Image (cartoon, grey):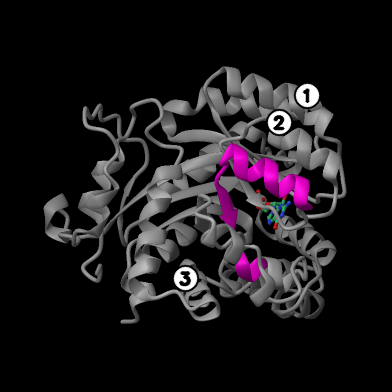
Amino acid sequence: MDWWVSMPKVELHAHLNGSIRDSTLLELARELGNKGLVCFPDVEHVILKDDRSLTEVFKLFDLIHILTTDHETVTRITKEVIEDFAAENVVYLELRTTPKKNVSKGMNKKSYMEAVLEGLRAVTTVEVDIFSEHNFDSPANASTFARGNDCASNGTGKKKIYVRLLLSIDRRETTEAAMETVKLALEMRHLGVVGIDLSGNPVIGEWLTFLPALEFAKEQGLLITLHCGEVSNPVEIHAMLDFLPSRIGHACCFGEAEWAKLKSLKIPVEICLTSNIRTETISSVDIHHFADLYNSGHPIVLCTDDSGVFSTSVSGEYSLASSSFGIQKRAMFQLAKNAINFIFAGHRNEMNTSDLVEVGTKGSI
Ligand code: 5GP
């Protein structure tokens, strides 16, 4: 097995509906096609298309949501996504998703999230830790990440994956809708919800619309990650950095002043190489800001964004970074290990990252 697959990894930026298997999307499209609800050949073409601009990606998400937004399907895709990440030795996953209403299916934001939780419980190929309530005394100990996995140690003979949830606010939403999502996150804290994400089409919506809900979330102890700088918008980027989120995603369209601020604040960046290249947000991997952030020791974590939509995997991102920037296996392992420092679990003592020792894989170096 290649080292980038066998190496234990942490995934902190994965959107549920962006991480669906193509085969599942096609099966769902075929079912709706048979019922005359979508035109299957058209949908098939869109799903299998490889290169998409950022704008086209958001059109694709609208299509995906038509295929997936009923309780049963949400449960199915959640189960499959967890199993896929676990299969490539992701040991800790923060999965984000936008709670949705779908009146025709009797779905509200809460029942959507209950369907997600049902999906976590439905996983069979791996043991899923959804919301361990351990109160560990020792501080987070990333060095334990390097130890091998003992499948038998958890008594099931199965690998284990820790999963925590982030609820996403879509930039199309109103302040009230954003607040509803934050209140739902607070209500579901004991069920593994650890934070809030702001995502959705970056050319839609105003920062000030979401700020009250994000401030409330922060006051209540939820951690926040923001999609920041996917398009050039210095005013918004500065406002987002001033908010002091716990992490940001992408950071593609930063100018000198924004880089300086980000670096001085040391806000960790979720780097999504394939996503940025596929959407042409960054023209080629060799000029990606990963290199500068990595070389300057800025906190970064490699992530997929949308493994289904961009046909990638966490292992693929590690392999790509290693080959593109000439980083050797040992340093890549260190990069993977450092990601533990930026996870949202453990901030309320509900999990200590030293617990990850039990789920490191045999292939660790
Ligand atoms: P969901 O929240 O429905 O599970 O996952 C899909 C949603 O995540 C999309 O509709 C969009 O709001 C958000 N998303 C996925 N990928 C991206 C991305 O690259 N950039 C931004 N800004 N949002 C994204």
Q: Quadrant of residue 111?
A: top right
Under mark 1, the amino acid is Glu
Of residues 97 and 144, the one drawn nearer to the viewer in this rendering: 144
Tell me if residue 266 is in the magenta stretch: yes
Under mark 3, the amino acid is Tyr
Under mark 2, the amino acid is Asp
* Secondary structure category for the residue under label 1: helix
- Magenta range: 255-275
Which residue, given by chain and number where applicable, does mark 1 sit on?
A: 176
Q: Which mark identifies residue 242?
A: 2
Q: Earlier in the sequence, mark 3 or mark 2?
A: 2
Identify which residue is drawn at 85% across, 39% down.
235
Q: Position of residue 66 (x, y in %)?
A: 74, 57
Disc 1 CB within 8 Å of nearest ligand 1 atom = no
Identify which residue is drawn at 32% across, 34% down.
351
Q: Which mark identifies residue 107?
A: none
Q: Residues within 10 Å of mark 1 (few under 14, many from 20)?
A: few
- Asked if the residue at tag 2 contacts the one at tag 3, i.e. Cβ–Cβ closer than 8 Å, the answer is no
The answer to whether residue 26 is visible is yes
Which residue, given by chain and number where applicable, does mark 3 sit on?
A: 318
